[in-house]
């Protein structure tokens, strides 16, 4: 009897340890997933979309650019010709806007280079549709925001958008 009671106590202790381990691991996993979601929300919060009317923006033309698109499945040399304008948020502090406007105007060659780098990474199939055009504009906007360290850049407009299929 003594032996069986001792075995019973050991089995119960092992079951309690197993249950405690399962609870602890579950708790850690749930906290990790909640942490990931909150980090994702913080990243998304930094990329808030500001919807402004054209009157609330100051436009900076970057001019016309021509680029060879990335080779697609057909291996063709496709081209794109765009004329880009960057929209700045003009609803905030006038002095901040003027400072950024002056800085951006001095750095237009760098901004044009960023636009070019994004265009040459895109394929014909990625840019031939309206959705592809909008996506490319968003990529350019985020790249410019990151490069210039400012959320005053709120939109990218294309006065010209010609995609030419190569031979």
Image: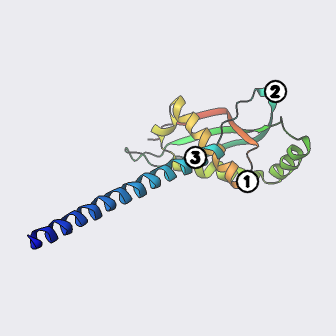
Question: What's the distance in space between the residues labelled 1 and 2, CA to CA?
Answer: 24 Å
The N terminus: image quadrant:
bottom left
The residue at the point 48 percent across, 49 percent down is 34
Q: Is 160 located above or below residue 66 in the figure?
A: above
Question: What's the distance in space between the residues labelled 3 and 1, CA to CA?
Answer: 21 Å
Q: Earlier in the sequence, mark 1 or mark 2?
A: 2
Residue 119 got which mark? 3
Which residue in the structure is indicated by mark 1? 149
User: Residue 113's x, y, as percent?
Assistant: 67, 53
Judging from the image, what secondary structure is the residue with disc 2 in? helix
Q: For this rendering, which residue is in front, 33 or 155? A: 33
Q: Is 96 located above or below residue 18 in the figure?
A: above
Q: Earlier in the sequence, mark 3 or mark 2?
A: 2
User: Residue 115's x, y, as percent?
Assistant: 64, 48
**Left or right side of 112 for 99:** right
Q: Earlier in the sequence, mark 3 or mark 1?
A: 3
């Amino acid at each position: 009897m003594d032996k069986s009671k001792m075995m019973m106590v050991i089995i119960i202790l092992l079951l309690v340890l197993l249950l405690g381990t399962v609870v602890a691991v579950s708790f850690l996993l749930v906290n990790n997933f909640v942490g990931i979601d909150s980090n994702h929300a913080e990243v998304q919060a930094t990329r808030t979309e500001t919807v402004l009317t054209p009157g609330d923006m100051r436009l900076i033309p970057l001019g016309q650019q021509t680029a060879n698109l990335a080779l697609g499945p057909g291996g063709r040399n496709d081209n794109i010709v765009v004329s880009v304008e960057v929209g700045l948020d003009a609803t905030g502090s006038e002095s901040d806007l003027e400072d950024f406007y002056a800085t951006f105007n001095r750095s237009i060659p760098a901004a044009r280079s960023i636009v070019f780098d994004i265009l040459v990474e895109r394929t014909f199939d990625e840019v031939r549709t309206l959705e592809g055009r909008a996506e490319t504009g968003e990529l350019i906007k985020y790249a410019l925001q990151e490069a210039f360290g400012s959320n005053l850049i709120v939109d990218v407009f294309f006065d010209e958008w010609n995609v030419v299929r190569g031979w």
